[in-house]
Amino acid sequence: MNVKLFDSEIKVMHVLWREGPVTAKHISDVLKEEVGWNMNTTYTLIKRCIGKGAIERSEPNFMCRALIPKEAVQEAETNELINKIYDGSPENLFAALLGKKKLTSSQIRKLREFVEDWE
Amino acid sequence: MRLLQMSLSGGILILTVAVLRAVAMDRLPKRIFPALWALALARLLIPATLSLPGGRVPSLGTIGRETQKISGAVLSVLTEGGGAAVPAAPDRGPRLPAEFLLWIVPAAVLALILTVSWLRCRREFRTSLPVEDAFVARWLREHPLRRKVEVRELTGLSTPLTYGVVKPVILMPKATDWSSHRQVRYMLFHEYTHIRRFDNLMKALAAAALCVHWFNPLVWLMAALINRDLELACDECLIRHFGGGERKSYAMTLLSMEERRGAAAPFGSYFSKNATEERINAIMKANKNSLVVLVVVLALVAAVTVTAFAAFGGGKSGNDAEPPAGDTVTDGDKDAETPAERDDDKDADASVKPEEQLPDAAAYIGEYTDPDSDTVGLEIAENPAGGYVVQIGIYRLTSLTDGVGLLTSEGMVFTATDADSNPISGIITVSDGTATVTFTDSTWNYLPNGTAFRYVKTSGTPNLWSEN
């Protein structure tokens, strides 16, 4: 995926990922509650997401649908984290995770699968 | 023309403050600069006719015809936006002289540019996300204001900033290290001080002055210096609050933000490298204030202010010798015959208002006794090199002999070295001969922050204990 979404835009995407296609009005209501944005702010961000090809808009009622799956954004964000903070090495990220927190065996299994998929 | 007079006398004030700033910056409490700029802004933005609604109308009739046209139109424009209760100038509308168009067109363009860029920034700022951090939540509870303050974070910001006057929001960079409580505390306190002092309002007024006086280079200089001085004043307040012992780590915080900014600064920050350097220098040199310089400066500014405000009326009514500045202004303009109807009271008020009130040093200097143990416990002496020498003895606990004091509007702030050789600081307040010493920044286990001791003044002459 080569679309770079900022945190505020990802916040908008989260509503769509969670609830499926909804109206812009609904997104605005949810985010007003969650992060205190007014309608104009949310609409600005939806427009930006549309511009980046992350959201598709259809009439009537300004229905919004996510064009990018959650996993794609998560992967992009993880890649960025690894590149920026862990010097491009996933091993460093793992070392940090393992050093910092106790992981359950299921978490370790998931991580192992993730690494295997990586290459 | 009235506008030119306002601009000129305001310019004189700006020049005075700018020169003072260059010459005596290190020797003065930084807080007086925003106060002085407020004075200059008042001069630039308040036409005297607004303070005299009754006197203005007859005066118009006596001014030369040309001037009347211009000032009438200018005044109506100046007052329309503010909604001030001034009757509309008699002949605005159809007859717009060329000079007036020459002034209003660039002013309107500048106002449009500033408004649009402000709206753009605000739109960006509003996409910020709330910060859910226990430390921040606690900090906000501990620092209540009448206005509700919010802390949010925004991607792409390199330094914290505050927007909004009525509903202020502190925006923190996305990259903030929330686990570094010390740094977060500095950033929050700095922005909190901006909010408390309505600094954003002052910046808005400076922008308004810039639009009205766009032709005056001194006003542009002022706008730039106001931005810097508001930061310096906040830094000073922060150092005072946390104690001089923390100035180094605060300076390091600023430097690390400067480093990060090098990478990307999407929303233009008005601070050049130079300005950061100036801030760091000011932080490290704080506490060298000199009372003598302060008094001289305030006297000088008072004199210039009276001159500048008096010059406006173009008056021959001055009750003292007319200063040269006043003459230049009136000669430069054609309407020296403006009726001398301005009120001297108003001028005096304006020149006194924003100055800072320091407590009387004599009330602090002297020797104090601990009433419980009946031993000498506190000495405050003037340091010939500037500031004060503070010695504190706490019965059967410790004595701090190397205290350095600085008189502030809240009391005497001091910093000393504790028994573990760490810096320790606090504040002394004196009322009715009783001194209260409160430790505000201590790492020594036996004197936790907030510990306070009371001493009774026994002599006005300090008798310092020798170090050995």
Image (tube, rainbow, N blue to C red):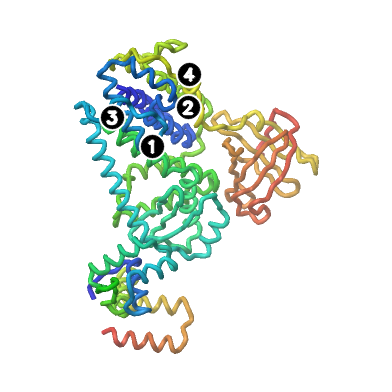
Q: Residue at x 40, y 60 (%)?
A: B153
Screen quadrant of the N terminus of chain B: top left
Question: Which of the 4 quarters of the picture holds residue B97?
Answer: top left
Residue ID for mark 2: B350
Task: Give the image location of residue B369, x and y in percent.
Answer: 75, 37
Marks 4,2: beta carbons within 8 A: no
Residue ID for mark 4: B344
Residue ID for mark 1: B82
Q: Nearer the viewer, mark 3 or mark 1?
A: 1
- Mark 2 or mark 1, earlier in chain: 1
Q: Is residue B96 left or right of residue B89?
A: left
Q: Secondary structure at mark 2?
A: helix
For residue A44, above or below residue B381: below
Q: Nearer the viewer, mark 3 or mark 2?
A: 2
Disc ID at residue B216: 3
Q: Which chain hosts label 2?
A: B
- Mark 3 or mark 1, earlier in chain: 1
Q: Secondary structure at mark 4?
A: helix
In the image shown, does B451 or A74 lie closer to the viewer?
A74
In space, the residues marked 4 and 2 are separated at their CA atoms by: 10 Å
